[in-house]
Every structure is written in structure tokens, then in C-alpha cells.
Image (cartoon, helix red, strand yellow):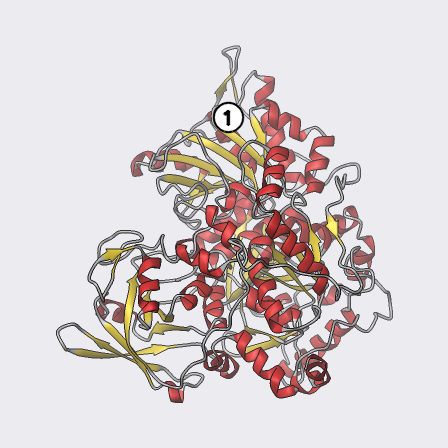
Amino acid sequence: LIVSFFQHALNSGIRRYHVAPVLCQRAKVAMSHFEPNEYINYEKLEKNINIVRKRLDRPLTLSEKIVYGHLDDPAKQEIERGKTYLRLRPDRVAMQDATAQMAMLQFISSGLPKVAVPSTIHCDHLIEAQLGGEKDLRRAKDINQEVYNFLATAGAKYGVGFWKPGSGIIHQIILENYSYPGVMLIGTDSHTPNGGGLGGICIGVGGADAVDVMAGIPWELKCPKVIGVKLTGKLSGWSSPKDVILKVAGILTVKGGTGAIIEYHGPGVDSISCTGMATICNMGAEIGATTSIFPYNARMKKYLSKTGRADIAALADEFQQHLVPDSGCQYDQVIEINLSELKPHINGPFTPDLAHPVSDIGAVAEKEGWPVDIRVGLIGSCTNSSYEDMGRSAAVAKQALAHGLKCKSKFTITPGSEQIRATIERDGYAQILRDVGGLVLANACGPCIGQWDRKDIKKGEKNTIVTSYNRNFTGRNDANPETHAFVTSPEIVTALSIAGTLKFNPETDYLTGADGKKFKLEAPDADELPKLEFDPGQDTYQYPPKDGSGQHVDVSPTSQRLQLLEPFDKWDGKDLEDMLILIKVKGKCTTDHISAAGPWLKFRGHLDNISNNLLIGAINIENGKANSVRNALTQEFGPVPDTARYYKKMGVKWAVIGDENYGEGSSREHAALEPRHLGGRVIITKSFARIHETNLKKQGLLPLTFADPADYNKIHPVDKLSIVGLADFAPGKPLKCIIKHPNGSQETIMLNHTFNESQIEWFQAGSALNRMKELQQKSS
């Protein structure tokens, strides 16, 4: 069957096993040191760009060049920003360990023998911050041995590279080894856009999308709009690259970038380091952007050379015209920021788009009743853990130490990778940060994703933390809904941790040294890259064998961590009638609310177990409580997952009603798998975040939006819903929803959707994976 499937591949739009592209005539350059036989194919990119430019007859943005340069059929693909669906051929796939479990389980279910494109797994999410780097890493290896073994053996069997625990955070590893100008990379983590700092189109997706690409199937993406951010002036003083994205987040809000690529351009770009550009692109996920990107320049060339990829830089120089925007290209929206006037910012609490100048935050906090005393300062994470970030933080710490001061707040440091850890140890930065009171954690995500065994407060205790992370939703870092988390640059975190209060402005305020004398911190200055070569540290990469067919992948039927997947049921051809409402959500509902992380991460490979966290963080509009909903069959209030399981046991279909930007945040597809597993059929909202909407479609659910957002108020938690007209389900055609109230009255509203023809086939088949199997069977 598999052989026949691949014989049919060329005619059905499904690609064969990955074969190195036609080699560039000008040079033969490997995509990475770890895949010496997989080559960068700028000539194909150039050819596709020229085809599309001739068709569109207009200058192209950089985003368009790289996206359209990866079209499966550039000659015939319909292209309209914000409207059409593109069929694309990404160059590679990257998966972090929490999402890789489900992605690899789905790939195993596909029946395919090997991935079709270069792919990697990165162990960074399952390491809990507790005692410090080495101890926490040893503990994680012991606790997660079953999962790490599964990922390592699955990688070996199916041709996927495996980065062991302790390697570092996926996005830093990608920047150091895999991203390059013009690459198209998809990753099963929402902060994959970090790679845009090296001029690549790097997009966060769910595991099912990754499976498509690994299976050699063209990947679908709605043709993105392009928002231009023109940078002028030059960063200086306490202002940093982080302040650029904090400012942009304040302008665009958490949904302002939805359906668009953020493309930075202008003369100010050259004042930002390559890793600084990555920081900006990374946090573009917080404004809902498809991805973010910078044009290829000398700062990227410098970084490529320093990370052992001078050959890629030389090749990029030859093709530079395709790695920058065309003169005269048009953006759908333009934002201008003068870097010379940009002040240090701090955003929060509870949402990453609530922007404040650092100079104002103390007064705002006092006015709003937010705690001004800082309990913990945390630097690092995938957003800000570069050599430059650590150096600037160390420069601040060194000044405090010279005056006999240490941090008043607790202080933690998370290196982004083993290479960064080893290099900052060699160059003394790590010791300076320890001396000022810091605890160096493992090379992992840690507190940024809730992997933090926090002991200094009790749950429910109101407190403030400041971080250099990217996300600060309620309870995200420590599972405490009363923790007020603010995000800012690492150097500002360090300064505020030394002062111990939000009321301190390092640009103007003075500290008192151990000798009683007042002094002011000078703006930090540090090298963007080490003067010596990077120290790679320990070797933590496992190459996949040339032939992994004999490798055994073990999933115990009694495991509480891993569970092989069963196919979801197909659509029965009927309308969805008299569905109960599991919950009508009030306000913000992120993927953290839908499928919490932290202690739940250990169940990411076991769908039934992790479904016990379904929507436990969402607020029920009926009673204003989290994880408390009315069971419409018993009239008793109980936990959301228990109620969903009861409905499933009784054979009753159910729906969820949501508000704006439903599913923002992480790319975790468990937020779509769980409602499907527990019997959900429809999610109706005012609007969706991009990745979550796609994930819902992939799992056979119907993500629908109110044609009139005011209709949200017509539905009550005690109502029943029917979605009618599914026999005529078609792209662009709204669906009818009949609301049945308990008093016998009815109302009819219209619901919109963004399904295209192939996505409707996913729904009809029960899931995208089911549809893939149907195509395999037809080709046999």
C-alpha cells in the first residue's frame, strides 16, 4: 500500500521521500551541519519568485518572495492576500518535546515509513525549574525517561534528528543551526517565528500540520496579508530590541496581526543585532501574526559566520536580491517606529499587549492596585537568552556588585541553549549573574511555560514578577491566578530585580550602595557575539540512522504518559441537532485556558489523560467561575472535563461558545484534540486565533464565527443548538444555527467559516489524518 501510495504521489500532489533539491549551480551548500546531503536551493526559490512576479506584475514584499517562492505550483496557484489558500512546500519541520509526542503518534498512525523533509525533535518543555540547572536536568531525565525514549526511538525509526534534554530551547537551537535567509520552516510551537531574525519564514503550527509536511503533502496556509513596520533611527541607551515588539504589541493588540506577516524594514533595521531581530520576531506570536521577518543584512551575515555557517552567508550574498523586499512594494498596513525615540517598555499584567513605558509603570501599578514589590525577576527564555542578552544583564549586575548590592528580588537565569550556557560560563557572565543573587536554571523553557516549582508564595497570594519572557497570561508562569506578570527586556528585569520594585526607573532613579552613597546605573553595553568562538558545550544531538526500519518504538498499553491514537469517527452525513452547550466562555480564552500546561505537560502524549484539563481555566459566563459548569442532563454543577465525559457517555454532542480571539497563545493542538476526544463537535466564537482555528479543523471540529458578533448574547448556556445545512457545506457559504431556548422559543442566526474544499473533506472524514488515510487507500 505504501509503495503504491508513493508511486501515485507525483500525480496526486503528494511528494516522495525527501530527495535533495537540484543543487545550486553557483554553490553546493548544506542546509545545516547535521544534514550534509540536504542542500539550500536558492535557484528554485528564484525561479518561483520570477514566475509569480511576472503573473502579479508588481513589486513583492520579502514575505511574499519567500512564501510564494515555496509554492507547490507557482504557475497556477491562485494568489490573493487574505483570501486564497496557498499550497506550500516547506523546507523543514521542527518539534518541541511536548507537541512532538502527539505529532509523532499521528505520524505513526499515517503508516508512512520515513519523513519526507528534514525534521527535528527538541527536548525543552519537560524540565521543571526547581533547584538549578544540573539537578533539575537529572530529575527531568529520570521522571520523563519513558517519553524521551519514545521520542528518541521514534526519531531514529522515522528519520528525525533528536536533540536530547539539556540541548536548549527549540527556537535558540533553530537559530544557531537551522534557520537561514529564505528558508520556510514550520514548527510545532507558536514562537517558531523566532527564526525570522535570520530572514526565514518560520511559522508555528499544530502537530497535524507538521504531519502533513513530514508526509510530503503540500501544506495549506491562507495567503497572509503583510503588515510593514518601518524602523528609523537607532537603538541606544536602555532601549532594546524587546522594546520594539512591546511597542508594536501595544499598537496592534493580541489579535491585530492575525492573518498577517509582520515585515520589518527601513534604515533602523541595521542598528539591531541578529539575535535582537529574533527577539522581535519571536514575540510577534503575541499579536497573532502568522510570522515576522527581517530582510537579510550584514548583522545576519555576522551571526551566520560566528555560528559556523559562513558558506550559507556567502550563498545568501549571491541571492540577496531575493532576500530583501522589492523597491516600491505595497503593505496592507504600515507602522512607523523611530528607534531613536523609543523608550524602554514593560507590558502587563495578564496580557502581553498592555504596554507601558518603564518610567510610568510604578505610578500605574499604584493607581491600579498592582503589587509594586517584585518577588522574582526571571531572565532568559526563547525570547531573550542570547549572548548579547546575557551580556547586557551581566553589565547591569556588575555595576550593582561594584557598589556592594545584590538583587532584592529572587532572580533566575535561563540560558537558551547548551552553546549559550557554555559560552557565558567561559566568559564570566554566568558567574556575575550568580554573584548578584541569580540562580542559573537548565537550558529549557522552565518558568516561561509554567514548569516552575515555585515555593516563595502560596497559591492565591497577590504578587508581582517581572520576566524577559513573551507571554504573561493569568497563571501561566506559576499556576497562581494572583501573580501579576510583566514582560520586559532582560536588562530592565535585572535592574528592577536589584531595586526590588516597579517604582524604579533605571534611566533616572538612583540606588544606594552598601557604603550609603547614591549611584545611578549606566545603560548597559555588551558584545552581540563573543570575541572568541562559541563554546558548543556538550554534544547533545542524536543523528537518525540511514536506515531506521529495524528500530522498535515501544508504547505500553498501560502507560500513563503515552497512548496510541484511535481514529476519530467520520461525519454521519446528518445535521448536528440539539447539541448541548458545554460552556459559554466569558472573556479571554487562550490555549492555556483550554489545555493548561505546567503539571499537565506530562500527559501530552496521552490524549485521554490530558483531556482531564479541558477548559479548566475558562470562565463560565453563567456563574463567573472557572471549571464549574451546569450539567444540562442532571442540572448539577461540576468540572468541565467531567461534564464533557458524561455527555460523551450518554451519546450527546456538545458545543462551546467563545468570545474574541479564542485560542490565542500557544500552538498546542491538544486544545483541539481534547474537545474532539470528549465528544465536542462545534466551537462558535466572535473570532479565532489562526493556529487554533486550523487545529480545530484538522481534528474534524467545526470552528464557526458569528456573522453578527452581537449574536453571542442570544445564546445562553441552557440552550440547545442545531447546525443545519451541512449536506450543502461549501466554501464561503454561511451555515445556519437554530437556537432552542428552554421556554420553547427559537431563534435563527448565521455563522461564518473559513473552510476550503479540502478542509471540508477533513470534516467529512472525521479528521485530516483520516482523510490522508483515505487518499492512501484510493491510491493503492
Q: Is residue 274 left or right of residue 346?
A: right
Residue at the image point whose x is 65% and y is 30% from the top: 430
- Give the percent coordinates (x, y) of residue 638: 27, 55
Q: How many marks?
A: 1
User: In this orientation, which residue lies closer to the viewer: 625 or 234?
Assistant: 625
Name the image quarter holding residue 75. bottom right
* Whether residue 546 is situated above or below residue 162 in the rendered picture: below
* Most foreground residue, 273 or 69: 69
Amino acid identity at mark 1:
Ile
Out of 431 and 2, give the one closest to the viewer.
2
Q: Can residue 263 be spotted in the picture?
A: no
User: Is 110 situated left or right of 378 in this image?
Assistant: right
Residue drawn where x is 68% and y is 37% of the image: 421
Residue at disc 1, secondary structure: helix
From the image, which quarter does the C terminus lie in?
bottom right
Q: Residue at x 69, y 79 (%)?
A: 2
Q: Where residue 325 sits in the image (x, y, percent)?
A: 65, 65
Q: Quadrant of residue 489?
A: top right
Q: Does residue 31 appear to the left or right of 122 in the view shown?
A: right
Measured as percent of width and height from the top left, residue 431 is found at 65, 26
Residue sitting at the far top: 515
Mark 1 highlights which residue?
A: 498
Q: Quadrant of the N terminus?
A: bottom right
* Residue at x-position 76% and y-position 42%: 536
